[in-house]
Image (tube, rainbow, N blue to C red):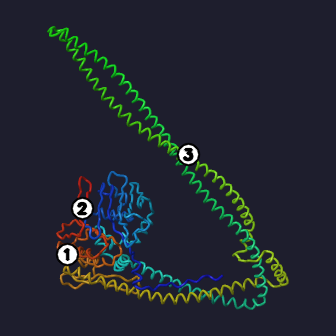
Amino acid sequence: MRPESPQPRILSRSTEEVSKERPSHLTTVKEIILENFMSYEYARIPLREGLNLIIGPNGAGKSSVLLAISVAFGQAYTERSRKLSDLIRRGKDIARVSLVFDNSPKDGRRPIPYSKADTFMLSRYLRRDGSYWFEADYKEIDKSEVVRLLQEFGINPDNLLIIMHQGMIEELGAVTPQERLTMVEEAVGFSQYRQRILLAEQELSGLVGEESSLLQLIDNANQTLEYWKQVYDRYQEKRRLIEHRDLLAKELLWSAEAKLTKSLQSAEEKIMSKSRALEDLKSQQVEVSADADQTHQTLLDKQVELRKLYYALVRAESERAKDESARAAYQSIKEDITGLSNTIDEILGSSQDRNVKRLKELSNYIGGKGAAAEEDALRRKSELDREVSSLQPEISRTEELIKRTMDSHISFRVKYEVLAYRIRTTESDLHDLERTSREYKSELEKLAPDLEKAGQRIETVRQPYEVSEELKLVSAHIQKMQDVPDDAEKIYNDYSGNIEELKVKLAQLQDNKKSMLTELDSRKDVWKKAMEDLVESIDPPYQAVLSAADASGFVKLEQGANIEDAGLNLYVGFRGGAPSTLDPFTQSGGERSVALMAFILSLQARIVSPLRAMDEFDIHMDPKNREAMFKMILAQMKQREASQYLVITPSILTVFDRSAHVITVQAVHGSSEVRELK
């Protein structure tokens, strides 16, 4: 068998094809939720499309918001190289950062298609012991899934052009032109394009080395083959017969194997079908059993409840009967007391004797107490009547519920027994099929050693007895050629087969190398044109932003000898000075910040990521340039639809706009608190 030769890659693609790699359905972060994260005990930070401005004094916890976003995106260390466990609020063992994404349909499609809700929550948990995990809509996921989700939206939290933490404006100014170009390519969605070119160059280098090795092998093989060619003609006929004999022997084995395999496959398919059916029946039985247990427990609970209702009804009826009897007795006593009181009044008249007065007072007291007791008895009767009236319908409802629950329980028990019968039947069928399968496997195992020696499968439609007859005839012809040595055939076959394979592989390799060279040159031209178009599109806005800060400059694509040497240089000059290369030594910190912000703003129309964030980019700027930069940011935001910007600054700004969403952060009693300015 000849080895497969590498196929030419399709490398050339237009700039328009590259731009189609950008995600077409983007999302934005609606809210950030912080729990026990750094100085935050609990905070919900709403975000909007467009510009989100976070302001507040130093140390209030502004930078923690951007840090929380990066942590949720999967970063393992902070910008200060602290471990994740260092980010947990003091005195707490666990922290959580959650990002709530807008997942509402856009053009009939959700940005995160496997989630059917209008919001999608990505959370990261941090524990004091150093462990952490991710959740998507409260379901645990791997970090690889987070990375894949962010890649779909073009978000890389490590790219300074997408997320710039506090103090990293200086880091962006110190990168090499090559690193800057790599950042830009990734941010605008072109990174995979150059990576494919570099990978193709590596493959091309490998092809050149392989070509040289093949040429040397072919030359050596030709010298040896020339000798064995003289011997080969004498053994050609014997080789043909031996190959045919071996082929027939293999065909005989594989014809028997094919018959057994077909029977085994049929049995195993039936086993799989029966197994799935059995698992389904058992699953149904478990569900029905759970339902039956639940209805049984409900029935017991309701029976207890019914007995309690009956006891309450009996008690109320009993007390009501006792009260009726007591009221009747009291009425009789009342009449006797009234008559006695009248008699006392008639006998005693208006006597002023002290004992007489006490007797009258006692008579009045007994009458008053009797009236109060009668009033209490009437009130209790009313209460008992209401209690009896409320218990009777409740008893009726409970009895009806018990009846329905009993019906459901009986139904579930019947289903359970039917399923149990079907399971027993299916298990019996499955046992018979497994026994048949074992018999076929046993026969195949007996053939296995011979099949392993036979090698590659031979497809045949002939019956075993037909192959056997032809094998006997060929073996007889070989027996007549015993004087022909077998090692001559083997040596010649080895050399002739190898040299033909090497020649075919060399021809294919040379064709592939030529095709790859042509395609690689074409792809480089397209990449160069794409980069030049990119620079041409960002240079005017770069100059415009610099002009607002009384500066000038331009963006230049530096092309080295190799594509990996290509870089992107920024030129800038202030106060009428000639533009020079931006570096950490020529310009001041404020001037570098202005130039870098001009560069970042010029890229906004091309950046793929829907979320861009920067923290304290203006730390080295004077008030004039700071105000100018914020004006340019506001102007840029109004032109970018469906993009989200997060800017953090401790500065007091006089430039605001209704389109900016402003959030303030304050430290209150050792905890950061946020407030949204309407």
Dot 1 or dot 3, earlier in sequence = 3
Disc 3 target residue: 410
Q: Quadrant of residue 310?
A: top left
Q: Secondary structure at mark 2?
A: strand
Rendering coords of residue 243 (x, y %): 75, 82
Q: Nearer the viewer, residue 492 or 89?
A: 89
Is residue 374 toward the left or the right of residue 427 in the image?
A: left
Answer yes or no: do the residues labelled 3 and 2 have beta carbons within 8 Å? Answer: no
In the drawing, what numbered circle is on residue 676? Answer: 2
Is residue 608 toward the left or the right of residue 478 in the image?
A: left
Measured Cα–Cα span from mark 2 to mark 1:
24 Å
Is residue 358 toward the left or the right of residue 114 in the image?
A: left
Q: Secondary structure at mark 1?
A: helix
Dot 3 or dot 2, earlier in sequence = 3
Q: Crowding at label 3, few (<14), some or many (≥20) Cα neighbours within 10 Å?
A: some
Dot 2 or dot 1, earlier in sequence = 1
Q: Nearer the viewer, residue 166 or 462?
A: 462
Q: Quadrant of residue 78?
A: bottom left
Which part of the image, by quadrant, shows the C terminus?
bottom left
Please name the amino acid that badge 1 sits on. Ala
Please name the amino acid that badge 2 sits on. Glu
In the drawing, what numbered circle is on residue 628? Answer: 1
Asked if one can make out residue 167 in the rendered structure from this viewpoint, the answer is no
Rendering coords of residue 119 (x, y %): 37, 63
